[in-house]
Image (cartoon, rainbow, N blue to C red):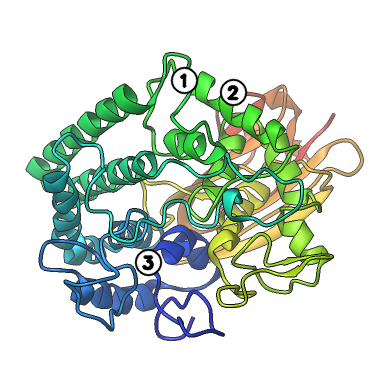
């Protein structure tokens, strides 16, 4: 990314498309130090905001900010999502404060044009869940069933943006705004469920993406979440173990699969090599992430030559899933900037070992696990002046050792609880070598 979050470097766009960085911002922060970059770019975002509160589709904006390429669900929301991500990883309240009023204006633009709280009007170019499977050209692949209905998608993004504004207000100590936008989020949620969710948990459109976004944005009552999850899983089966998702829903579905106890399905998706998948693109010569799942199809050739990027980071947002799930490194919103964080790796997918690190603002966080030999080894490094909650798969806490001794008596290690087949420890700064006998 040069100067702006460039979605692709090779064709006439080369613009700071907001939808792409909205989904990729988390992965970008795991990969590089993005604090200064995003601080600068968010000034471009505010400069490009229309007088009525619409955020631009891309920032900087070379056209009249009140005219075209503005106000699109999932794209404009980057004006709220990116500052939130920066706060999560860097603890930068200034970023939230500088962009708070702009974010409010975006939410109010949507609300004022849609008083029933369903985002049906004023959606600009209305891209939806961009490049979902309905756009694919591949013989035998379903031509319909991937696209979330545009008003359903837009309403979910409206709710998401409103929820983040409420959370941002809480961080900034703006209690009136916190209450106001928390109430608005609940009202949007109620309107969404009344209009789009059936008694059986089916969401209008019945798409993998719709279920993934509704689950990820906490838009469903607790009683409906298991039903929606089942529909999402059935949707993956209907596509013969493949995704039908687009830019906004792909990595979020991966995260929801793991969080809901279906990590095996997520690993199957990332490991598959048949079309459409990350593996298929690699098998067909990819060295960078493609814009389209069908950018190139063996035997058919290239997709639309006028809009077909082979270096485009949006569906590369799965990198965030890899950091959070394979390595197990997760931020904690109650203690931003990794003052405290969570380590919870999920081995699976045939992987026998993994190792990696994240160079956080508070120091290097490292994890390495190995399941060869029937047991599990987990090595972790916790930076100075930080603490971590570490989840270690184990049936009993007594089975967990640290450096050859019972972990329950190890220096810097405190057992908190057993949870869902894991021993959960509070761990102080330092390097630790955990093992679990099987």
> What's the residue at 83%, 64% (across, down)?
283
User: Residue 18 shows which numbered tag?
Assistant: 3
Residue 291 screen position, x and y as percent:
59, 67
Q: Are marks 1 and 2 in contact (CB under 8 Å)?
A: yes
Q: Which residue is mark 1?
A: 201
Q: Residues within 10 Å of mark 1 (few under 14, many from 20)?
A: many
Q: Are marks 1 and 3 in contact (CB under 8 Å)?
A: no
Name the residue nearer the viewer: 85 or 329: 85
Name the residue nearer the viewer: 363 or 213: 213
Sequence-first tag of 1 and 3: 3
CA distance for labels 3 and 2: 32 Å
Q: Secondary structure at mark 1?
A: loop
CA distance for labels 1 and 2: 9 Å
Q: Residues within 10 Å of mark 3 (few under 14, many from 20)?
A: many
Residue 329 visible in the shown view: no
Sequence-first tag of 3 and 2: 3
- Asked if residue 100 lies left or right of residue 160, the reply is left
> What's the residue at 20%, 36% (across, down)?
117
Residue furthest right as drawn: 373
Q: Secondary structure at mark 3?
A: helix
Residue 366 screen position, x and y as percent:
63, 59
Q: Which residue is mark 2?
A: 230
Name the residue nearer the viewer: 394 or 55: 55
- Asked if residue 396 lies left or right of residue 172, the reply is right
């Amino acid at each position: 990314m040069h100067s702006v979050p460039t979605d692709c470097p090779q064709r006439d766009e080369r613009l700071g498309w907001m939808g792409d960085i909205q989904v990729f911002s988390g992965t970008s922060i795991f990969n590089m130090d993005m604090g200064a970059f995003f601080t600068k770019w968010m000034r471009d975002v505010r400069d490009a905001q229309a007088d009525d509160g619409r955020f631009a589709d891309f920032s900087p904006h070379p056209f009249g900010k009140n005219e075209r390429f503005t106000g699109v669900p999932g794209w404009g929301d980057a004006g709220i999502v990116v500052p939130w991500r920066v706060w999560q990883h860097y603890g930068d309240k200034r970023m939230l404060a500088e962009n708070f009023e702009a974010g409010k204006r975006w939410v109010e633009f949507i609300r004022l044009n849609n008083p029933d709280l369903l985002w049906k009007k004023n959606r600009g170019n209305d891209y939806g869940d961009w490049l979902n499977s309905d756009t694919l050209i591949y013989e035998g692949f379903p031509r319909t069933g991937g696209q979330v209905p545009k008003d359903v998608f837009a309403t979910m993004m409206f709710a998401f943006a409103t929820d983040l504004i409420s959370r941002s207000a809480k961080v900034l100590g703006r209690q009136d705004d916190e209450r106001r936008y928390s109430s608005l989020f609940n009202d949007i949620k109620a309107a969404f469920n009344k209009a789009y969710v059936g008694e059986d948990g089916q969401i209008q459109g019945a798409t993998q993406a719709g279920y993934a976004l509704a689950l990820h944005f906490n838009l469903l009552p607790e009683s409906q979440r298991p039903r929606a999850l089942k529909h999402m899983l059935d949707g993956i089966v209907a596509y013969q173990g493949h995704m039908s998702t687009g830019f906004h829903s792909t990595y979020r579905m991966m995260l929801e699969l793991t969080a809901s106890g279906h990590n095996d399905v997520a690993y199957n998706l990332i490991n598959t090599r048949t079309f459409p998948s990350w593996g298929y693109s690699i098998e067909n010569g990819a060295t960078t992430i493609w814009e389209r799942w069908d950018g190139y199809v063996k035997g058919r050739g290239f997709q639309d030559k006028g809009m077909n990027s082979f270096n485009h980071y949006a569906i590369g947002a799965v990198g965030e899933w890899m950091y959070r799930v394979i390595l197990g490194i997760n931020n904690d919103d109650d203690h931003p900037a990794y003052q405290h964080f969570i380590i919870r790796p999920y081995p699976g997918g045939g992987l026998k070992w993994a190792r990696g690190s994240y160079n956080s603002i508070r120091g290097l966080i490292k994890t390495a696990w190995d399941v060869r030999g029937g047991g599990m080894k987990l090595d972790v490094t916790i930076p100075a002046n930080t603490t971590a909650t570490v989840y270690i798969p184990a049936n009993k806490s007594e089975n967990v050792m640290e450096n050859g001794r019972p972990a329950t008596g190890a220096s810097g290690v405190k057992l908190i609880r057993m949870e869902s087949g894991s021993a959960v420890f509070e761990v102080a700064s330092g390097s630790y070598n955990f093992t679990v006998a099987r």
